[in-house]
Amino acid sequence: METGVVVLIGLFFAVSVYLMLSKQLVRMLLGIAILGNSVNMLIFANGRLTREVPPLIPKHLYTPEFATANPLPQALVLTAIVISFSFFAFLLVLAFRAYQELGTDEVNKMRVAEPDDNQTPPQGY
């Protein structure tokens, strides 16, 4: 099972890098979202994928009697999901605003600081 998860995580990383190298802004944003999901899967897979008991320790013991689930990766992934979703929503609104202003979502066309159709400013007074 873990080999399949490792292959899936590697596939997600490869797809995210491929999408982030695109010239279209929306594909870049999807690549960033998939990269965030692949990192979350990687953190979650490091916290063991087996079903184990909750990390509750009885009062008479200082350590658990047997293997327990690790709650730290689960908490980190849950926090990362919320942060990556808000980051993706912000970037999506930013890309939409840039598309409204510039009329394109291709990054090479967005690099022009001054469009060709504008006149140059006056050179003297």
Image (spheres, grey):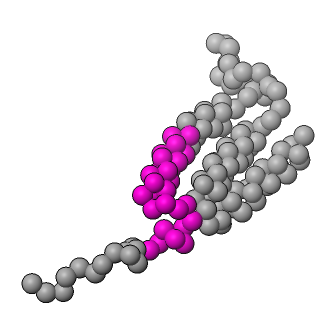
**Image quadrant of residue 71?**
top right
Q: Is residue 92 magenta?
A: yes
Residue beneath the point at 77% across and 21% down: 53
Write the start and end of the magenta stretch as one range: 85-112
Residue 48's x, y, as percent?
78, 37
Residue 79's x, y, as percent?
56, 36
Residue beneath the point at 66% across and 33% down: 74
Residue 6's x, y, as percent?
83, 49
* Location of the N terminus (image quadrant): top right
Residue beneath the point at 56% across and 40% down: 85
Residue furthest out toward the top = 59
Of helix, strand and loop, which mostly describes the magenta segment? helix
Can residue 87 be seen at all in this image of the molecule?
A: no
Q: Is residue 3 above or below residue 64?
A: below
**Image quadrant of residue 76?**
top right
Can residue 105 be seen at all in this image of the molecule?
A: yes
Which of 89 and 35 lies nearest the eye of the viewer?
Answer: 89
Q: Is residue 23 magenta?
A: no
40 left or right, relative to 105: right
